[in-house]
Image (cartoon, rainbow, N blue to C red):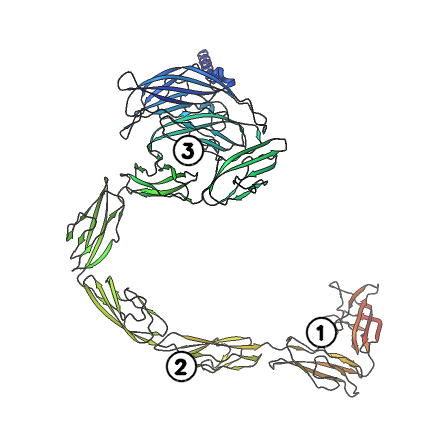
Amino acid sequence: MEDLIRRSCLVWLLSYCSTMAFAHHGKGGVISYVYLGAGSTAGTSQYKVVIQHYVNCERISDEPSQVYLGVFDGASSSLVTTVTITQTSKTEVTKQSFSPCISPDPTVCYYLVLYTTTLTLTDNTGGYVLAEQDCCRADEIVNISNPSSTGFTNVNTIPGVINGVVYRNNSSPTLVFRDTAVICYNAPFTIDFGATDADGDVLSYSFCSAKGTGSSSRQPNPPSSPPYADVTYASGYSGSTPLGSGVTIDATTGLISGTAPGTPGDYAITVCIAEYRNGVLIGSTKKEVLVTVANCSLSAATLKTAYVNCDNYTFTFSNENSAQTITSYYWDFGVPGITTDTSTLATPAYTYADTGTYTLKLKVSNSTGCTDSTTSPVKVYPGFTPAFTVTGSCYQSPFLFTDATYAKYGTVDSWSWNFGESSSASNTSVVQDPTHQYASANTYTVTLNVGTSKGCSGSISKAVTANDKPLITLPFTDTLICSIDSLPLIAEASGSGASYSWSPAYNIINAGSANPIVYPKDTTVYTVTVTQNGCVGTDSITVNVLDFITVSLPADTTMCLSDSIQLRPVSYALKYAWSPGTALSDSTIKYPNAAPSGDITYLVTANLGKCQDKASIHVKVFPYPKAYAGVDTTICWGSTAQLTGTTDADRYTWSPDSSLLNSSSLRPVADPLITTPYLLTVQNAQGCLKPVQDTVVVTVIPKVVVFAGNDTAVVAGEPLQLHAVSTDSALVSYTWTPGDWLDNAFIYNPVATITSDAVDSIVYLATAVTPQGCTGSDALTVKVYKTGPTIFMANAFTPDGDGHNDLFRPILVGIARLNFFRVYNRWGQLVYSTTEAEKGWDGLLRGMKQESGTYVYMVQGVDYLGRAHFKKGTFILIR
């Protein structure tokens, strides 16, 4: 048993290794065919079939000598036959020369291997699917997940009969072999996948998913039946973006262009070439190529394949090559007859003076000596707007799509429609105004890519809803008529070919039309059934019936002159007429606005068909009451103001009333402390009931604060400078009382010289007056000493916080300025210092109480005659 297991494993390993030995050589492939005419047997057609393989040079020995072509019925996917095709030729393709702007030169070498045969096939309706498979891919393909376990399938289709038209006499597009493009990572490149068609069919190119195979055989014989599953792409890649979002394919030319991925390695690219004949998709050829993104850098001039501006005349150009070694640029924007259309900027902008097609030229040089130039057409044709319209509503009938693109220059000459139904074989079209029938009810996103003969291109997408029933439009679903009237019903289905049927058949004329006439005598619900191309839908209209109509208006009313009111009748009527139309916003609507200038009576006539009723309302107009709050006034702080309001209204109020005396009077007294606006509101008890307001402002001059100075002392006969200050900078005058011994009692800074020996002290009062007459006062006491100017010092103090003798400070007599006052402890440390006359020491040093004992003071001041006075001594701090 152990030996059996060992031998089984050995067989599996050899089979696996054999498979792997052949699995790494292919670079891609394609199947093409040419219609040769009718076969020798009646009811048959003959085709030349060519299978192309692209094989790495180092793997050409692994290429098989024969392949197996499976032929399947296009309708049933059943196998018709398997054909063994022997290798016809192999041609080595090696790129020998490279641009000096590429570094280093990559290796480009592979073989084109052909397998050719002739097939004779029975004419059928569904056509045929041609397929050839290989079990495996190379181990390292950047954009495919698990490539070594993912096979590939080359596939093509031969059409049969489509919509009653025979297309089997078709040849697939002829693919031109141009697969020697050099692709450097992160560099711009182009690959021409363009093909020609012998039948003159319109070709449309697109990226599509590579097809895999679930077979473990090296070459499945026969190949598996269609349909074939898509391979699984690595993150960041897909069938539509095989080289990432920076690489696209031109749907018209098949030119692949863009910037290569940043990761060197092999990438699988698959292009599907759709064939359209007279707007009908008849076939699709799939070509798969394994391209190598080389580890090289490109330093050269690279432009887009074309520059088209269909919006304005201005372009901004840049070198599509991102190499960092480029040192100079020279642009020629291609305007004939001038030499000023050039630039040496890296990214110039240029505005063309006129429409047309110009040839743009770029020449670049780099630091390593590479010089390169290139050209590209520039097409300036502004005035291009893609647009289309859609007609249709039900999925069971075709929708008509009509191109409505606007092109000011040239003609619209290419259309590519995608109807948003990927599962449909007719999901795309290239005719101008196609039709498409959806398979089920849903909302689909339809996209039109459109181009012009001038090179303009663009796209537009719309959401198109395919309903499961006709789209019925009713102008109303609930209405009202009088029992003696008739009423036309209206129904409209989107699209053509609709038939209508109304029920019940009660008092109805033309019940089989879209617009019947009904005349019910009682409320009736009429239902319309619309049949359109097999779709059926219904909707209904409720017709409410009244035997008579009434209209009523509110009671007579009043309003204020210059205002408006809305007249609001109560009625089921559908038509109204007001008279007179004086001062009405509209005399034919149900709820008009009225703004009469005097008393008036309005009459409304209400109609529901032939039923009618009338009503009236009298509107009495009163003027607004008058309100006058009086003239604005100004008062001093602490004073009052008499307000004098007048009105002709029945009621009035003042606000705010917190600072008013007798606020219920038209003449209250105001005593505000700050400037206050007082609002007088008046209102009538009848007539015009809206309130009217007026405002009077009482401006309050702030309280005048005066400071005459600190109490002081002076020596008899010595001058004393007084100095009053006020918070009001607009004061006009000061007065000092009494005026005795002052040099001027009417200035803010008089000098007092007290010469009387009989005066021990005197109190001076300083009064300031504002421009408005508001006053403020302050007093100071002057002690008069009979000695000369001196400084008195105590011999002890007790800083215990009792309010008595808590500070040790100098007493200045006749001293105008204190130069300094200093206190030292027994060790000569300065514990206090000041130059302010009223301050003193509190017994603290840096917030800490000093101990009891003897301290030294020094003090110096200057008297009013400029003489210095100095004292020095000791004192005792007592705690």
The tag on residue 648 is: 2
Q: Looking at the image, which is closer to me, 410 or 263?
A: 410
499 with respect to 743 (left or right): left
At mark 3, the secondary structure is loop
Q: Could you tell me the amino acid type at mark 3?
A: Thr
Q: Is residue 58 visible?
A: yes
259 with respect to 541 (left or right): right
Q: Quadrant of residue 840?
A: bottom right
Q: Looking at the image, which is closer to me, 96 or 333?
A: 333
Q: Earlier in the sequence, mark 1 or mark 2?
A: 2
Please name the residue that numbered disc 1 is placed on. 803
Q: Earlier in the sequence, mark 1 or mark 3?
A: 3
Q: Quadrant of residue 174?
A: top left
C-alpha gap between disc 3 and disc 2: 88 Å
Q: Could you tell me the amino acid type at mark 2?
A: Asp
638 with respect to 170 (left or right): right
Q: Say which quadrant the C terminus sits in.
A: bottom right
Q: Are marks 1 and 2 in contact (CB under 8 Å)?
A: no
At mark 1, the secondary structure is loop
Q: Is residue 213 visible?
A: no
